[in-house]
Image: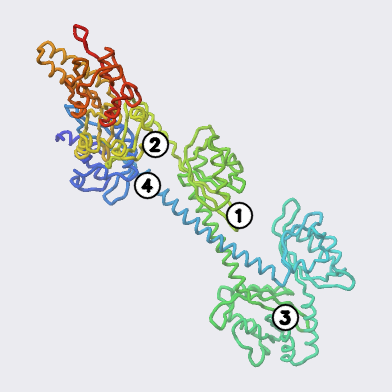
Amino acid sequence: MPAELRKIVEILPCGFISVSPKGEIKELNSYVLDLLEYNDKNLLIGTSFIKLLSVGSKMFFEFNINPVLHLSGILKEIKLDLKKKNGSLINVLVNLRVVHDENNQFKEIQITVFDFTQRENFEKEILQTNKRYGDLVEKLQEQNQQIREINSRIEALLMDAPIGVFVFTLNAKGKMDITYANDEFYGIFFPLLDKSKLIDVEILISHISVNDRERVLKSIYYSYEHMTLFKEEFDFCFNENEKIFLRFISHPISKVDGKVVWNGSVENITEKQALAENLHFFKQGFADKKSRFELLTSFNKIGYWELNLKTGEGIVNHVFYTLLGRKLPGNVFEKNNNFFEECVLFLHPNDLENFTTTRRDFEKNNSDYFEFEGRMLNNNGNWIWIWTKASLVKEGTHDLLIGTCIDITQQKELEDKEIKNNEILKENNNKYEEILNNSSDLIFSLDSNLKIDFVNQTWLCKTLYEETEIIGKPVLDFIENSQKDQITELFNQLSYKETVLEVELNMLNKQGKKLSCLAKLSSTFSYGQGLNIRGYLKDITDQKEVSFQLNQTLNNIKDGYAFIDSNFNILEWNKSAERILNLEKKLVYNKNIYELFPEMADSYVFNKVKELFDSKSFGDFEYFSANLNTWLHLIFTPTLSGMAILFSDITERKRQEGLLRLETNVYSNFLNSTNEDIDGLLETICKQIKEFHPLMIFSTLKVINSRIYNWISPDLPLQYLKDIEGAPIGPKAGSCGTAAFTKKNVIVEDIFNDELWEDYTPLAIKYNLGACWSFPIFSEDNEV
């Protein structure tokens, strides 16, 4: 490159690359070096340009760009991926131009390069996002399985709980509809339930004892109106002889149109009440606290404690100590004014404030109940969750706080895990939604009825629909009619089993425009039931349009077009190639050219094409195909990894040229020759006919005394000539003998099925002759 031109190229606001016919880089400017992070152009000069391309760009360059470039001479605004020095890829926009020298020989390809880094980084981020999404989906599935297992265990615990647990709705008319209840709940209220599991509140209240009814009604009405906790204990009478004592606690959750949703618990505390009465009896009847305590603990299976708020005396049973991993001492607390303070010593530091507040509220408000849950230190060094509840009992002038406690560690662990899982699930769902909306793919999911229940933002942008126009609609409404049967069959396959299917799918946007997409469809199942079907669609509409235009261009040219790789395998074949060589594309695609045309294997063409491959140079020559009996004009154009071939049928042209040349030569020889030169003239005619009809055998025979003799036959086997030498002419003497006899042209298209050749068929078979045309030549005396 001249120095002045090199200076101009160096200051261009874009990259410049010059590529030789062999595909090697001849020149490039500093813009390209900076883009690819090279500090020395000598590292790239002389290397193959195609090595700078990614795999996808190589294929696109070889099969699409290079053939069209050499046909049109220039291409603009083509997107490619180039490799940096460190191996990473950068997205660029290139313009390409073919340059020829003064002899019109291919000199170089000049390429201008523009940086598309921002787009390339964005696509990288999309790929990384898709990968994170895949990992996230797997993690969500694991977490969902854990949550299902936790819910299953919690449900099992609730069903086996020793108290009734329920969820129900209560409307303004007093009808209570149970939506969930465990076995203990139905066991308590079984006599009042009908088949629909409905309980009339009026009937329920009618079974409450008269002394408690007014109080309970006021509490229900207040809870219903103000959405506050309902908590009562009362006698419940099924009939005159059957009465139980219930503790009823329920929490209102929501209130819509006068209907309140509650959850809560109900407990039959009849035995506990009797236990309290017995306890009071024991307190009155026994002076020895130790004996009374031992009698009480003999039938109590939960932690029990008792505190005299006035004297500070405390009593605990062996279960209380066992919960803390300790043994019951020789005697219980006696006159211990610091019972609560000693409990504080075992409490977790984070629960101290809650315990102090609960105790202060109990003492300040003169409450009848004390309730607390917190962590206490076990003797083995672990923290356990303890739930305790106590009631205030009057005993003369003393106030006794009598309570029970149980270990709720397992329950709290389940609750904490559920809270954490919910937080993780919420966070993951937010990330999941963000990933889906930032994806370049069109993503959707379907319910079991093949209706859309989710689409991402890319779907909405590409199809121009609003979300309200998509959700809940059948997915087939947005698929091209010609594909609906095929896609319906695919969805049916996905509904039978968990699988992944890939298909090219044509979607329709709001304006009716077709979107061509590569679709990846998958389904998920749980416990043998299909949950949903998901689809990931990559928009390839522009790619299809470019490919279509290229195919249209190649298929509309009159010449045959083929592309072969360096192994001589055919990778492209247009309509004209099918017509000229009578071979459909599906029969030649990816086949080796020498398998299809074996006669070329050791021919001049084979060696010429190998030479063109090695030298990366153009070729333009003519070739006769014996298999097709056709003359072809071949133009070979080298690419970086193959060869583009343009060819046309020139058989008729070759025939006309040969005939013209033959006529000229015959006429010239006729004017300048004597009778003695007739043999040379006939031999010239034979050879020249052979040039434009390579498969034809030309022979000249003499007729002497009604017999035929060889004159000039350079291409017939000598033995054949000996076999027919002196054969008589006649009405059935082959083509030549019959023509000489009848003095007319004789054309035999099929020797083996023509009566004129009956006596000569064995010779025809022996020397592989299939057809024969014979024309008599007459002397001035009208003799043959």
Residue named by callout 2? 586
- The alpha-carbon separation of the residues under discs 3 and 1 comes to 52 Å
To which quarter of the image does residue 113 belong? top left
Tell me the crowding category of disc 3: few under 14, some 14 to 19, or many 20 or more residues within 10 angstroms, Cα based. Answer: many
The residue to which callout 3 is attached is 402
What residue is at 31 percent from the left and 23 percent from the top? 757
Q: Earlier in the sequence, mark 3 or mark 1?
A: 3
The reply to whether dot 4 and dot 2 touch (C-beta < 8 Å) is no
Q: How far apart are marks 2 and 3 (CA)?
A: 92 Å
Label 4 belongs to which residue? 121
Q: Position of residue 223 (x, y in %)?
A: 75, 61
Q: Nearer the viewer, residue 668 or 48?
A: 668
Please give the count of numbered marks on the rendered protein: 4
Of tags 3 and 1, the one toward the viewer is: 1
Label 1, on which residue? 529
* In this picture, residue 654 sits left or right of residue 80: left
